[in-house]
Amino acid sequence: MDTFTDTRTQQIPDDAIETMSRPASASGRLFVVSNRVMQRGQTQAGGLAQAMLSLLESRGGTWVGWSGETARATALHAHDVDRIRYRTFDFDAAQFEGYYAGFANGCLWPLLHARIDLMRFRAGALKHYLQVNETFAAWLAAELRDDDTVWVHDYHLFPLAGMLRARGVRCRIGFFLHTPLPAARTLLHLPQHERTLGALAHYDLVGLQTPADASALRDYFATLPQVRRVDDDGAEFIDGHRCAVACFPIGIDVDALARLSEAAVDDADVRTVQDSLGDRHLLIGVDRLDYSKGLPQRLQAFGRLLARRPRMRRRATFLQIAPECRREVNEYRALSREVQRLVGDINGHHADASWTPVRYVNQGYPHAQLAGFYRIARVGVVTPLCDGMNLVAKEYLACQPAHDPGVLVLSRFAGAAVELADCALLVNPFDTDAVAAALARALDMPLAERRARWTTGMQRLRAGNIHQWRQDFLDALARTAG
């Protein structure tokens, strides 16, 4: 049971944030900074939260982020759980709306996924984005010592290192981007990009998911007026600071997921799904309902499979799990309506009294149940239009039974495609006919080929697991000049 050794909430006046006292504690501490934090016992989608939780549980350190709440005034919540110090902030509603929905998700998210047509820049939202980063910076600057290490995560916090340096912080500061990074010429479409993307130059190390992402950042740095030179390892700036740029593809805990999937065969919901299939094969997709995930194109491909290959009818059921998010954004509401229309169209044309081709679910599931769903699925369908890594692809493989593994159909535009090209069936999600053909091939693939592909994939997953990813990044950060 978790032991809470310190629980307190304090109101922080705007003019007092920078005067918070520096505690006396051991040197060489680790600070993780991300938009959201995760505590033991919580369930949260994505690899970042679980990866950082297990790191801090084993090493100890401080996790700084948003509390998940809004309030009338900025408030810091502090409590310790075993070796982890949690420090989370409330923000007022207008500030958080501008920082999170307005700039991070309304402007940066579409930009980073090469959807500049959906980018909505508002100067007021940028102001709030910078204010929230300043709040994190003010508290951290009062806490940090020169031998500490700070690991910042994702696009919500691009400018944090520059704000810390302006406050005199000299410790090593690393940054990892969990999204893709488009070409430099795309990044330059962001108004006032130097204040956000350009601020990445103040980090000692920036880690990205793929070699293409790392190349894009180096090309972007080359456009900045303060750059002295750019090379294969990063960039040097006229003030003498050097920012290393490297690729660290995030992994998963392979063995833990394999054990989870084995245990999940006894889960009641998993058994119910399994029994409902009869002798049909299950195809599964698990995604947030986001325009980057390619759900409409995926459904169109499945519909094409049924329309063009009558022998596949009644042979396969497609389960698409897609928790809704960002309902306040018009594009997401429109996407939800489009997906529901496509599901209804496919089921209306192909279903009968005993078979529904598409099962569409808007709720999330705990990892323990998802692992069971992955395990019983003959085909994992991971076809984003653009993605940083997409850990669902890796999780699906890790959950497969060795004696009878399924097949991964994977978009070549997911970061995971770089590592899994030899084991997955790679597709262009914009090519409906090609995706439909890949789904048919996956359903027809003989056991020997399925085993060979799965074995290759598991070797890759084990070599680049989540523990190796964390260690590689922190080791590389430790080698920087600081």
Image (cartoon, helix red, strand yellow):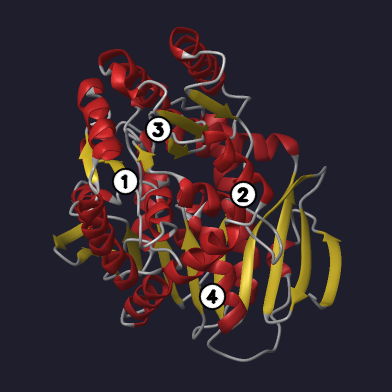
* Callout in the foreground (2, 4): 4
State the mark number for residue 132.
Answer: 2
Instruction: Name the quadrant of the C terminus.
Output: bottom left
For residue 28, above or below residue 310: below
Residue furthest to the front:
279
Q: In percent of the image, x 26 and y 26: which residue is there?
A: 436
> What residue does disc 1 label?
408
Crowding near pointer 1: few (<14 within 10 Å), some, many (20+)? Answer: many
State the mark number for residue 292.
Answer: 3
Q: CA distance from mark 1 to mark 2?
A: 40 Å
Mark 3 falls on what kind of element? helix
* Mark 1 vs 4, N-terminal side: 4
Amino acid on which the number 2 mark rests in the picture: Val
* Callout in the foreground (2, 3): 3
Q: CA distance from mark 1 to mark 4?
A: 29 Å
Mark 4 falls on what kind of element? helix
State the mark number for residue 82.
Answer: none
- Measured from the top left, where is residue 445 in percent x and y? 23, 43
Callout 2–callout 3 Cβ contact below 8 Å: no
Q: In percent of the image, x 30 and y 49: which residue is there?
A: 415
Amino acid on which the number 1 mark rests in the picture: Leu
For residue 165, above or below residue 400: below
